C-alpha cells in the first residue's frame, strides 16, 4: 500500500483545520449596517396602517465579537417591532450556515412605527410586496453579519453606564375597583439608565462600534402618522454618530421595557427625536466615563425553558362569556378555542423562553431574553448577577407577548392589558396562549437566568 497519498491528504486536512482556528490573542470586533426601510405602501405595526413614506430610515446593525479561544457572537440590532421564533430560528440557522457564526442575538427595538419580521417566503401579512421586503431584509441581516465578521480587527473593550429615562412605568391601579389601567406612573419601577459597550480599534485608537441599551417602548412617534420611523432609538444612534463620527456603528438593544412607555406617548415625531437626543447624550456620557474590560476571552451560554400559561376559565364563566360575546367574531374565535381545550382536558400552550449570556469573566455580562419582559427583570439581573457590569436585552430571538412578574399575574382579571386574564380581554387573551403566563413563571425565569451565570463562591465584582 502506498501511504504517501494518504499522508499528504492527512497533512492537508490538519493544515486546513489549524488554519481555521483563531490565530490571534485578545478580542477582535467588526461592525456593519444596512438599511432595511420598507417602501411606501407596506404595513406599519402597531397600530396597523399602510405607510405613505419615511420619516427616518430603519437599519440592521451588527457588532461581531470573537476571541482567540474560538468564541464568537454576532449581536444584531434591528429597527423593527418584533420577529417570531420561527423567523429568528430560521435566520440564525442561515447565519450559522452562511457566515459560520454559531451564536447570533437578534434584538428588536420594538418601534411601533416599523414593521415585523417573518419567516422566509411568508409573513404575517398576506401581501406580495411585504413578503418581498421581508425576504430582502432577511438577506440584508445575513449580509450585515457576514460583513461585520469579515471586518473584524483587534480591539479593546470598555463598558459604562449613565442615568437617563425616556419613559415611565405605564401601569396604574384604579383605587375604586383594583383594576390596572394604562397611564403615566411616575412612581412605578423603571430602568433609569443607559448601558454602553464600546469597541475601540487598537489600530486607530478610535471607536468602531457602540452597543447601547435602554428599556422603554418606542411609542413616542404618533400612531396616526403613516411615516415609517425608528422612533427614539434611531435618533439616539444618530446623536452618538454626530459626536463620535459617521463611521461608528451604533447598535441599539431594547431592554426590559414591557411595562414602560416612551414619553410622551404617541405625540409627535419631533418629541421622539428629542427623547432620542437625550438618550444619545446620556450614552455619550456613559462612553466618556466607561472603564476598560480586561478579559481577553469570553463565554456564551444558553438555556431554554417553558413558561406555563395561566389556567383557562371555568365552563360556567366560559358559557356566560360566549353568550355575552356572541356578536363579536374575534372574541368568539378565542372562546371556541378555549372550549375545545376544555373538552379535550388540555392546557393552553406554554411560552418558549430562551435565555443567553455573553460573559467577559466577572467584568461584564450581556443577558438576553425573548418577549416583552417587565422592567423588574432587568432590575433584578442588575442586582443579582455576579458581574461588575451588566447589560440586559429583552425582545431577542423570538416573541410571544408580554411576560409580567408574579405580582401582576396574581391579579387575575384585574391584571391589566399585559397581565390580565379572562373575563379581561387584555392583549394576551388574543394570542394562541389564550392568556398571560401562570403565576410561578417569575421563578422559572430567574432560575433559568441564574443557571447561565458562574456558580462558584467568588464574590461579585459589583461596586
Image (tube, rainbow, N blue to C red):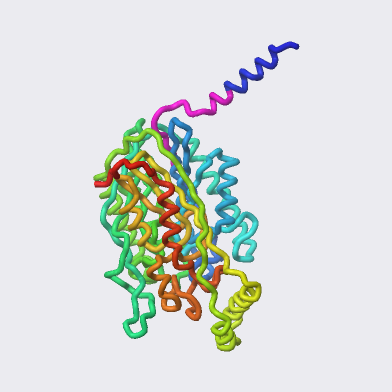
Rendering coords of residue 420 (x, y %): 45, 74
> Is 74 left or right of 207, judged from the image as shown?
right
Above or below 252: residue 199: above
> Which residue corresponds to the image point at 39% horizontal and 48% vertical from the top-left?
366
> Which residue corresponds to the image point at 48% horizontal and 29% vertical from the top-left?
22
Residue 219 seen in render: no
> Which residue corresponds to the image point at 50% horizontal and 70% vertical from the top-left?
310
Rendering coords of residue 18 (x, y %): 54, 24
- The segment highlighted magenta reads 16-31
Residue 20 seen in render: yes
Q: Is residue 30 a member of the stretch shown in magenta?
A: yes
Q: Quadrant of residue 1?
A: top right
Q: In which quarter of the image is residue 174?
A: bottom left
Q: Which one is in front, 281 or 448?
A: 448
Rendering coords of residue 135 (x, y %): 60, 54
Above or below 263: residue 138: above
Q: Is residue 430 a member of the stretch shown in magenta?
A: no
Q: Which one is in front, 199 or 317?
A: 317
> Which residue corresponds to the image point at 50% horizontal and 46% vertical from the top-left?
104
Q: Which one is in front, 146 or 457?
A: 457
> Is 193 left or right of 342, judged from the image as shown?
left
Amino acid at each position: 500500500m502506498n501511504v504517501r497519498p494518504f499522508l499528504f491528504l492527512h497533512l492537508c486536512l490538519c493544515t486546513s483545520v489549524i488554519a481555521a482556528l483563531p490565530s490571534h490573542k485578545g478580542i477582535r470586533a467588526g461592525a456593519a449596517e444596512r438599511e432595511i426601510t420598507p417602501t411606501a405602501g407596506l404595513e406599519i405595526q402597531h397600530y396597523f396602517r399602510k405607510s405613505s413614506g419615511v420619516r427616518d430610515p430603519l437599519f440592521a446593525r451588527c457588532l461581531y465579537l470573537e476571541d482567540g479561544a474560538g468564541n464568537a457572537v454576532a449581536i444584531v440590532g434591528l429597527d423593527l417591532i418584533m420577529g417570531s421564533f420561527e423567523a429568528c430560528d430560521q435566520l440564525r440557522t442561515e447565519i450559522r450556515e452562511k457566515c459560520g457564526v454559531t451564536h447570533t442575538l437578534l434584538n428588536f427595538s420594538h418601534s411601533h412605527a416599523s414593521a415585523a419580521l417573518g419567516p422566509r417566503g411568508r409573513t404575517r401579512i398576506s401581501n406580495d410586496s411585504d413578503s418581498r421586503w421581508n425576504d430582502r431584509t432577511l438577506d440584508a441581516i445575513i449580509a450585515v453579519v457576514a460583513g461585520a465578521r469579515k471586518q473584524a480587527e483587534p480591539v479593546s473593550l470598555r463598558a459604562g453606564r449613565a442615568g437617563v429615562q425616556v419613559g415611565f412605568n405605564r401601569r396604574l391601579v384604579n383605587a375604586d375597583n383594583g383594576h390596572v389601567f394604562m397611564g403615566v406612573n411616575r412612581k412605578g419601577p423603571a430602568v433609569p439608565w443607559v448601558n454602553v459597550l464600546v469597541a475601540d480599534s487598537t489600530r486607530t485608537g478610535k471607536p468602531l462600534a457602540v452597543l447601547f441599551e435602554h428599556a422603554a417602548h418606542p411609542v413616542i412617534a404618533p400612531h396616526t402618522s403613516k411615516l415609517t420611523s425608528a422612533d427614539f432609538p434611531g435618533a439616539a444612534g444618530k446623536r452618538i454618530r454626530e459626536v463620535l463620527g459617521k463611521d461608528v456603528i451604533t447598535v441599539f438593544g431594547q431592554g426590559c421595557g414591557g411595562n414602560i412607555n416612551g414619553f410622551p406617548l404617541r405625540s409627535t415625531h419631533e418629541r421622539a427625536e428629542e427623547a432620542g437626543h437625550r438618550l444619545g447624550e446620556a450614552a455619550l456620557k456613559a462612553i466618556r466615563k466607561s472603564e476598560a474590560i480586561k478579559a481577553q476571552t469570553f463565554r456564551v451560554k444558553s438555556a431554554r425553558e417553558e413558561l406555563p400559561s395561566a389556567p383557562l376559565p371555568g365552563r360556567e364563566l366560559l358559557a356566560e362569556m360566549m353568550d355575552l360575546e356572541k356578536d363579536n367574531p374575534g372574541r368568539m374565535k378565542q372562546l371556541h378555542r378555549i372550549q375545545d381545550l376544555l373538552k379535550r382536558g388540555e392546557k393552553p400552550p406554554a411560552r418558549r423562553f430562551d435565555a443567553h449570556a455573553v460573559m467577559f469573566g466577572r467584568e461584564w455580562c450581556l443577558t438576553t431574553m425573548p418577549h416583552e419582559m417587565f422592567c423588574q427583570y432587568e432590575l433584578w439581573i442588575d442586582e443579582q448577577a455576579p458581574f461588575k457590569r451588566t447589560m440586559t436585552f429583552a425582545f431577542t430571538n423570538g416573541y410571544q407577548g408580554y411576560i409580567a412578574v408574579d405580582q401582576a399575574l396574581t391579579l387575575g382579571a384585574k391584571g391589566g392589558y399585559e397581565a390580565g386574564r379572562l373575563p379581561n380581554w387584555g392583549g394576551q387573551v388574543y394570542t394562541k396562549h389564550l392568556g398571560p403566563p401562570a403565576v410561578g413563571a417569575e421563578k422559572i425565569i430567574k432560575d433559568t437566568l441564574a443557571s447561565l451565570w458562574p456558580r462558584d463562591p467568588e464574590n461579585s465584582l459589583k461596586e
